Amino acid sequence: MNKLLGMQAFVKVAESGSFTSAARQLGVSVSAVAKAVARLEEELGVQLLVRSTRNLALNDDGRDYYARCLQILNDVEDAEASLKSAGETPKGQLKLSFPALFGRLTFLPRVAEFTARYPDIVMHVSFDDRQVDLIDRGLDMAVQVGEINNSRYVARVLNRGLRVTAASPAYFRAHGKPETPDALTQHRCIASALFPVWPYSVKGKRVEVAVRGPLVVTGGEAAREAALLGLGVVHSNWWTVRHDLEDGALIEVLKPYAVEGQPISVVYPPTRHVPRKVRVMIDFLVEITRVAEAEALPLRRAQQ
């Protein structure tokens, strides 16, 4: 059998969960796709897919083989692209996942620039605050918040920034501004169900302040919206509230005590030759977050 075509069929089935959808994407019959995958399994001597009357899913062997197939097919695609004219723009489908706030506040406001540069790339964007499994979801890349401890992916930190304490002008007019972290115990704080204490740096030592208030939320977006409504003080990653600080909707306090926030990184499957469509998106994400990092430098100096 043609092993490369078999891999292509398997990858399309794995990503779509359907022989029918895979056949439509490849422009062949459903039976041809089913036979290609069956031959592949026969040659390998393992089952790659768990079949039921309703759907198809990858088993453990299938997930591992999918990652290898994707790497090989990406290498082939990149090798072919490198032989074409240097002026040709990258093309193809690019499947991405972003944290909701990063996507809405950082990526989407600049996405028109990317589409203008690379009109032949079709982006399929989903929003998910969890650290998603790229292979299970059939993603080319994702942006994730927090430390990346998954050796299955290549990770590049885009931005760390500092944690920001802020509230609306109306709130501060009514309640005054805290001058030290300890003063937060006298304020209405928008607390997090997952992080009930807020970290700060006081004289070079990390301290944690247990906060309280009328509202406890589970997500950064809800905390930001509550702060904008004047409901209290919020403690957030800098990139989450950057635009609100710029337009004066929120005012930052406790700058000298700020600590470094969680990193935000772009992750993608390892490959010797990163596909051009992935490479240009990584470069674009670095570009649109570099400004944020530069603007954060005054805050970083204030911490030192």
Image: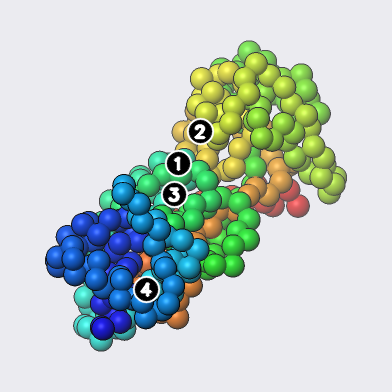
Residue denoted by label 1: 100
Pick whichever of labels 2 and 3 is earlier in the sequence.
3
Q: Mark 1: which secondary structure?
A: helix
| Neighbours of disc 1 within 10 Å: few (<14), some (14-19), many (20+) | some
Separation (CA) of disc 2 from disc 3: 14 Å
Pick whichever of labels 3 and 4 is earlier in the sequence.
4
Q: Amino acid at mark 2?
A: Glu
Residue 234: image location, x then y, percent? 62, 29
Q: Is residue 13 toward the left or the right of residue 273 in the image?
A: left
Q: Amino acid at mark 1?
A: Ala
Q: Amino acid at mark 4?
A: Glu
Residue denoted by label 4: 41
Q: Are marks 4 and 1 in contact (CB under 8 Å)?
A: no
Q: Are marks 2 and 1 in contact (CB under 8 Å)?
A: yes
- Identify the residue at image location x=79%, y=44%: 201
Q: Nearer the viewer, residue 124 or 167?
A: 124
Q: Amino acid at mark 3?
A: Phe
Residue 72: image location, x then y, percent? 38, 78
Residue denoted by label 3: 98
Q: Are marks 3 and 1 in contact (CB under 8 Å)?
A: yes
- Identify the residue at image location x=36%, y=56%: 51
Tag of residue 221 = 2
Instruction: Give the vertical position of 269 relative to 298 (above or below).
Output: below
Q: Mark 2: which secondary structure?
A: helix
Pick whichever of labels 4 and 1 is earlier in the sequence.
4
Pick whichever of labels 2 and 1 is earlier in the sequence.
1
Separation (CA) of disc 4 from disc 2: 45 Å
Separation (CA) of disc 3 from disc 1: 6 Å
